[in-house]
Image: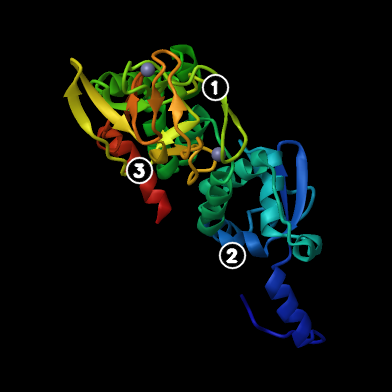
Amino acid sequence: MSNANGPGTTTTSTVSRRKWGGMVFFKVEEIIFEVPRYRFSESSEVFETMFDLPPGSEGNVEGRDEGHPIVLEGYEAAHFDALLKVLYPTPDDLISGTFKLEKEEWIGVLNLSTRWSMKRIRKHAIDELSKIPLDLVEKVALAREHKVAKWFRDGVNDLVSEHPIRPLAELKSRLGIEMACALLWIQAQRPQERTEKDFAIALCSLGCPSCFKSVFHAPLTSWCCNRSISVADYSTIRLLNGTSGTFTYSANRFQISLKLTSLRCSSCLDSCPIDYRPDYHCSSCNSIVAPSNFRLINPLHRNRAIAPELNVSEMLKEEIASYESWDD
Ligand SMILES: [Zn+2]
Ligand SMILES: [Zn+2]
């Protein structure tokens, strides 16, 4: 831009004009926006180039006034409005420190900043939207529309790990038939679901060493936190990490001895939920059960699914790579 000071022009006004670059008129849908052009050209080479174009043949510069706006075809006014909030935050935004856009507004900002190569704004919109919980299908759809490699990779990985997978109609309508096929194909390649055995205990797992029947037949109040522990609730008692027991074969069966001091409350974590000082009484065989001499009975075996190892990144590497180039 020229630095010439014409007659009667003060230095101050020249600098000011240069900073804001004058106003420009855009038409998006049916709305005319009058905005300072400075931050458009500063944030985007697309606008920098557009504003540098020589005037048209009739001497009109597009965007100069309401009658000659720059028409942005194929854009949404709501998106444009959201982008203006980011380009030109108000003093109120600054003072309150709570600059906040709605999710749809951030999506609009992401849309325009992607199309106009406003890299820093695009990155910020992605960061803001990453803080909002997105449905997986929406995440993948947004990722593809706006070329966000991370969302695409994470979203696809999570989608194919869902069980059961989403209905075909939902995948097809929101991601297109090709992507729906790819997802179903990836899911079909999953290795056989692997499981790991795990077991849990409850009050009814504390057995008598003489008759191997359960010693507790009624709910107890936990010693540590006064919670009611029902006999077959497998979620309130757990074994202390590192618990070891004696494992013996006698009375024609394998026996695992269990001390009450090895039990932990699942709420209090470090406390034993059952009083481990007194002896207990087995009502089935009438014997005395010392607190360190229970037998493990009725453990609950659970199958814990282990997430299959999928190499989605490998299968969709070309699409991911094409989006990653937008992160530079
Ligand atoms: Zn007994
Ligand atoms: Zn407790």
**Whole-percent x, y for residue 296 in the image:** 33, 25
Closer to the N terminus: mark 1 or mark 3?
Answer: 1
| Relative to 86, 186 lies left or right | left
Q: Which mark is residue 241?
A: 3
How many dots with numbers? 3
Residue at 72% x, 44% y: name it.
27
Q: Mark 1 CB in 8 Å range of ligand 2?
A: no
Q: Amino acid at mark 3?
A: Asn
Above-or-below relation of 269 to 196: below
**Viewer can see residue 118:** yes
Q: Amino acid at mark 1?
A: Ser
Residue at 78% x, 61% y: name it.
96
**Whole-percent x, y for residue 176 in the image:** 44, 21
CA–CA distance between discs 1 and 3? 23 Å
CA–CA distance between discs 3 and 2? 59 Å
Q: Which mark is residue 230?
A: 1
